[in-house]
Amino acid sequence: MPTSPLSTAQAARAAIATSLDEIRKDAGLTGHELAQRCGWHKSKASRIARAKTAPSDADIRAWCRACSAEDQAADLIAASRTAESMYVQWRQIHRDGMRRVHEKTLPLYQRTAHFRVYASNLVPGMLQTGEYATGLLRSITDFQGTPDDVAEAVHARLNRSRVVHEGNHRFALLLEEAVLSYRVCDDSAMARQLRYLLEIMSRPNVSLGIIPFMARRTVWPLEAFYAFDDAQVAVETLTAEVNITAPGEIRTYLRAFADLSRIAVHGREARACIAKALDSLG
């Protein structure tokens, strides 16, 4: 298992730093000489070379120019931008509100044929009712202090969720049983959300598994992750979304999903878990 969901982003940033440092060495410059040529404080080159500071596009151009390696700047800038997109803080993603991110990810949802989702804390977005989504997005907006476009974001989320009902998409979803009890909306709205889960389970393109409280764990609880075919895994942390595209790490998440599937219950037993949570609402 990965030691951290940030590992891909960190490795990509380290690779950029290593490439820049090799360019410096090939030019026969010390870090101090490079900093002087770029007009930087002497510690800046060292921090970039040790991946302590992410270089801007201008930094990479200046570095390559100082080393007479301008021909490498464009490729390094492209690689750096890709590395930075792997780890994006929620406050940055939501800086203009949440509607836009739902609209931006719509093409990804539309082209994905096979979704595999592990949910340790919330009902997955594509299975949320409007009321549940409203409660959740309201709490996120309040916590992050980002612009309030909750109503528009909920509409965009529900529009994105149409992939469950339209097109040729398959969904394998695993929920920790605790998800059925966590309240992000009032009891009546939560009851409607749970009834919707029972309804959606009957769709032939949806497999919904519940990992019971008392299941013997072969995989420990993880942070929620969404696998889009075999091409990308999005991991959700408190502060950021981590987008994983390295094939080896994707395979690790898919292996974890397969192992989690084996300790989950499906069909009648999963329905019983949902019914139990419904009964607890009174």
Image (cartoon, rainbow, N blue to C red):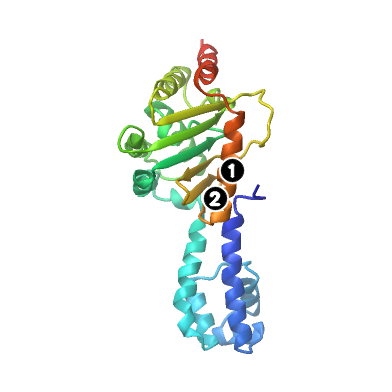
- Judge whether residue 238 can be spotted in this image: no
Residue that carries the numbered disc 1 in the rendered image: 255
Say what amino acid the circle numbered 2 marks. Ile
Q: Residue at x 32, y 37 (%)?
A: 159
Indicate the position of residue 87 as horizontal and vertical percent values. 53, 55
Say what amino acid the circle numbered 1 marks. Arg
- At mark 2, the secondary structure is helix
Q: Residue at x 40, y 26 (%)?
A: 131
As drawn, 188 above or below 153: above
- At mark 1, the secondary structure is helix
Q: Residue at x 60, y 88 (%)?
A: 27
Pick whichever, 99 or 124, lies toward us: 124
Disc 2 crowd rating (10 Å Cα; few below 14, some 14-19, many 20+) is many
Indicate the position of residue 139 as horizontal and vertical percent values. 48, 34
Q: Which mark is residue 250?
A: 2
- Judge whether residue 157 can be spotted in this image: yes
Indicate the position of residue 137 as horizontal and vertical percent values. 44, 36
Q: Earlier in the sequence, mark 1 or mark 2?
A: 2
